């Protein structure tokens, strides 16, 4: 538990991430952003929301709403250039989430190994 506290990830923050990625469309959007949508990348290395929307059959407002949930969960960050909005993975926040989850798994695994030794 102290591992998570050191990285200042609250239980509520973890829940928001799990909720955000628990939706099939948001998970697909997040994976597209992670893979940089292959060729749909701006010179700044970010994907435009309109390029993301073109990969799906949903309307632009629907995609924007999903992207906003991913942003609020701390998985992505956004940047506005003129009328276009670009998004990218917030790698530092994602690493903290990964570290917190990994810590929980490793802690569980260690407890199970100790129980098996007895």
Image (cartoon, helix red, strand yellow):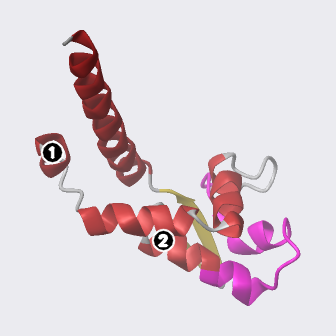
Q: What stretch is highlighted in magenta?
A: 42-65
Identify which residue is drawn at 38% across, 44% down. Answer: 95
Q: Residues within 10 Å of mark 1 (few under 14, many from 20)?
A: few
Nearest to the observer: residue 100 or residue 110: 110
**Which residue, given by chain and number where applicable, does mark 1 sit on?**
1
Identify which residue is drawn at 69% across, 72% down. Answer: 49
Precedes in sequence: disc 2 or disc 1: 1
Quadrant of residue 81 in the image?
Answer: bottom right
In the rendered image, residue 43 lying in the magenta stretch gets the answer yes
- Furthest toward the bottom, the residue is 61
Q: In which quarter of the image is the C terminus?
A: top left
Residue 75 visible to the viewer: yes
104, above or below 15, in the image? above
Side (left or right) of 14 relative to 1: right
Q: Where residue 110 appears, x then y in whole percent?
A: 25, 23
Nearest to the observer: residue 82 or residue 28: 28
Quadrant of residue 1 in the image?
Answer: top left
Q: How crowded is mark 2: few (under 14 residues within 10 Å), some or many (20 or more)?
A: some
Q: Where residue 58 appears, x then y in whole percent?
A: 82, 80
**Which residue, given by chain and number where applicable, does mark 2 sit on?**
71
């Amino acid at each position: 538990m102290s591992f998570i506290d050191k990285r200042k990830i609250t239980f509520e923050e973890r829940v928001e991430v799990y909720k955000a990625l628990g939706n099939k469309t948001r998970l697909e959007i997040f994976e597209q952003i992670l893979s940089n949508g292959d060729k749909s990348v701006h010179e700044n290395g970010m994907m435009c929301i309109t390029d993301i929307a073109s990969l799906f059959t949903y309307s632009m407002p629907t995609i924007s709403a999903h992207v906003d949930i991913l942003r609020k969960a701390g998985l992505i960050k956004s940047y506005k250039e003129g009328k276009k909005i670009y998004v990218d993975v917030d790698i530092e926040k994602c690493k903290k989430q990964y570290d917190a989850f990994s810590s929980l798994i490793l802690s569980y695994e260690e407890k199970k190994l100790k129980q098996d030794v007895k």
